[in-house]
Image (cartoon, rainbow, N blue to C red):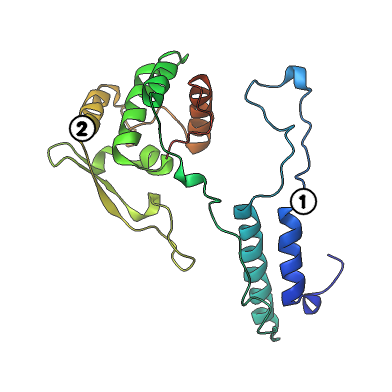
Amino acid sequence: GEFSVSALTHERIDKYMRALLETAIPKKNRKAPENAHPLYNGDQERTYSASSVRKVYYTLKKITEAHALAHGYSLDSRMFSGHDIPGAWDGHKDRRLEGNEEERLLAAAAASKKNVAEWRRAITILLETGMRAQEFLKSTYDNLSLDGRTLFLPPEIVKKVGRRTKKGIARHVPLSLKALAAYKEHEATKKTGEKRIFWQWKDTSSFDKAFKRISTRAGCPDVMPH
């Protein structure tokens, strides 16, 4: 905030991104360690991730270019070109289940305080289909074809691909026999007036937090729903 847009340069933006990758994230200090939840890890020393720095870069680029367009001035053509932009995922998407982790996850889910049967079906479907949590949670009965053994994912619930698209790419998810059986079993929980199939979880945030508790009990806390 101490200098104008005209002071931004290619070199300064590069230096800023490198600095962020080495900058410690401020601690929130919301709870004393003895009162914190067992899964709370806010006291760990962490720096900004590559994906976070990437988001900062593209946000800076977007607002700077928009401001220049709105106020009729030109930007240095080198400002946002030729940067070594950090990767989007940091390699965390390579994790796969190993050994007996599937059985451990199902056993940990069985020890949950609520949605025990629903968790078993959810884990089975996620493993069999490879859907993201958002796709899984926002799927509706209108798009489920048990006879055709497919689940249609409309573009509005699919992750966007590329910077110029406002919606994801719709697709049909083929259902294996295990996934099909899980969906058929889950029909017994169908709720009047609710289109979503797995309405037991409000959103991906509540789902992810609950899954984190399960994966931690299973001894594989770095396993994610997708």
Element under disc 1: loop
- Quadrant including the N terminus: bottom right
Mark 2: few/some/many CA within 10 Å (<14, 14-19, 20+): many
Mark linked to residue 92: none
Q: Which residue is mark 1?
A: 23
- Viewer-closest of 184 and 225: 225
Residue sitting nearer the eye, 162 or 186:
162
Residue at 45% across, 64% down: 162
From this view, report whether residue 8 is shown above or below residue 218. below
Q: Residue at x 49, y 26 (%)?
A: 215
**Quadrant of the rendered image containing residue 56:** bottom right
Q: Position of residue 158 (x, y in %)?
A: 38, 51
Mark drawn on residue 180:
2
Q: Secondary structure at mark 2?
A: helix
Looking at numbered disc 2 in the image, what kind of residue is underneath it?
Leu
Q: Position of residue 122 (x, y in %)?
A: 35, 29
Instruction: Count the labels in the image.
Output: 2
Which part of the image, by quadrant, shows the C terminus? top left
Q: Amino acid at mark 1?
A: Thr
